[in-house]
Image (cartoon, rainbow, N blue to C red):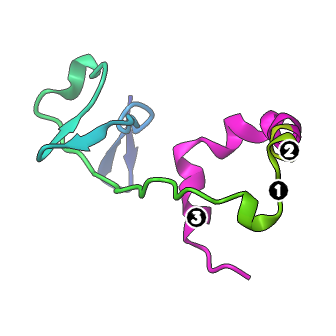
Amino acid sequence: MNVLFEGVILRDNASMATTLEGVYRNGKIELPNLPDEAEGSRVVVTWIRGAESVELDALGIDAAQAADLRRRLSAFAEDWDRPEMAVYDELPSR
């Protein structure tokens, strides 16, 4: 759907942006399940750093406590794992 706005035609942007998650490996970006309209499309690439490991023992957390914490926080995992949540990784620690 196109919309005329003060002499300018604006395209319907509902389908203009598609987010895909992939992996950069050996100089190439691997993307699964490309949409049909992908060929010739413009893209924007955002680099997301990998998660750093944490030594739980150094924080005084044993295996049983870690398992309990993981179980209690699992309800939030789907939201935390969304790509747009990575912006919070950039916030300075307190």
Bounds of the magenta span? 68-94
Q: Amino acid at mark 1?
A: Ile
> Are the two marked residues, 1 and 2, in contact with CB atoms closer than 8 angstroms?
yes
4 drawn magenta: no
Q: Residue at x 27, y 30 (%)?
A: 31
Element type where label 2 sits in the image: helix
Q: Is residue 66 above or below residue 12?
A: below
In the rendered structure, which disc, 3 or 2, sits on the residue that comes first in sequence?
Answer: 2
Q: Main secondary structure of the magenta part?
A: helix
Name the residue that disc number 3 marks.
Answer: 89
Q: Residues within 10 Å of mark 2 (few under 14, many from 20)?
A: few
Q: Amino acid at mark 2?
A: Leu
Q: Is residue 93 above or below residue 22?
A: below
Name the residue that disc number 2 marks.
Answer: 69
Judge by depth and name the residue closer to the eye, 26 or 79. 26
Q: CA distance from mark 1 to mark 2?
A: 10 Å
Q: Residue at x 69, y 41 (%)?
A: 79
In the rendered structure, which disc, 3 or 1, sits on the residue that comes first in sequence?
Answer: 1
Q: Is residue 32 left or right of residue 73?
A: left
Judge by depth and name the residue closer to the eye, 46 or 16. 46
Element type where label 1 sits in the image: loop
70 drawn magenta: yes
Q: Quadrant of residue 10?
A: top left
Provide residue 13's location: percent of width, then percent of height.
40, 39
Q: Residue at x 52, y 45 (%)?
A: 83
Q: Quadrant of residue 23?
A: top left
Name the residue that disc number 1 marks.
Answer: 61
Element type where label 3 sits in the image: helix
